Amino acid sequence: MRFIIFLIILTNLKYSQIVYEIPFASKGNEIEIEVFNNSEYLLNDVAVTATEKPNWLEFDSEQEVISLMNGNENKSVIFRFNINENAKVLE
């Protein structure tokens, strides 16, 4: 019984999300997004774009491009952003 409970706890920890609190009106924040090419094909110029964002969220660049991705390869992109003074609490 202890072994089953241990596995359940490990599974929940592995798939749980971490929620970060970003300070109001903060600058220089970063979010890293991992992209996976689950095909066997080489991909060129993979665009990762921030869409449907609130007006108070200001990105340095709303699009990052991965120039080359091999098949079955992971790559990360980093978006840098600021939270302006017009941000609404819990939006």
Image: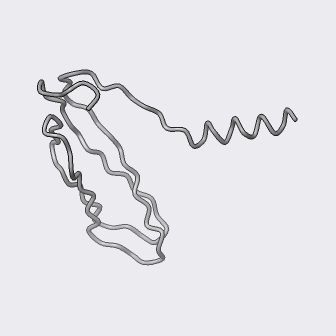
Q: Position of residue 7 (x, y in %)?
A: 75, 40
Image quadrant in which the C terminus is located: top left
Q: Position of residue 89 (x, y in %)?
A: 24, 24
**In the rendered image of this protein, does residue 20 appear above or below residue 63?**
above
43 displayed left or right of 3 = left
Q: From what the image shows, is residue 47 above or below residue 84?
A: below
> For this rendering, which residue is in front, 50 or 77?
50
Question: Horizontal and vertical percent for residue 55?
Answer: 13, 39
User: Would residue 7 be found to the left or right of residue 24 on screen?
Assistant: right
Left or right placement of residue 43 versus residue 14 in this view:
left
Name the residue at 49% across, 38% down: 17
Residue at image position (55%, 38%) is 16
The N terminus lies in which quarter of the figure? top right
Colour treatment of the image = one colour
Q: How many marks?
A: 0
Left or right of residue 26: residue 46? right
Q: Position of residue 38 (x, y in %)?
A: 48, 69
Identify which residue is drawn at 12% across, 27% down: 86
The residue positioned 39% from the left and 75% from the top of the image is: 42
Q: Is residue 3 above or below residue 86?
A: below
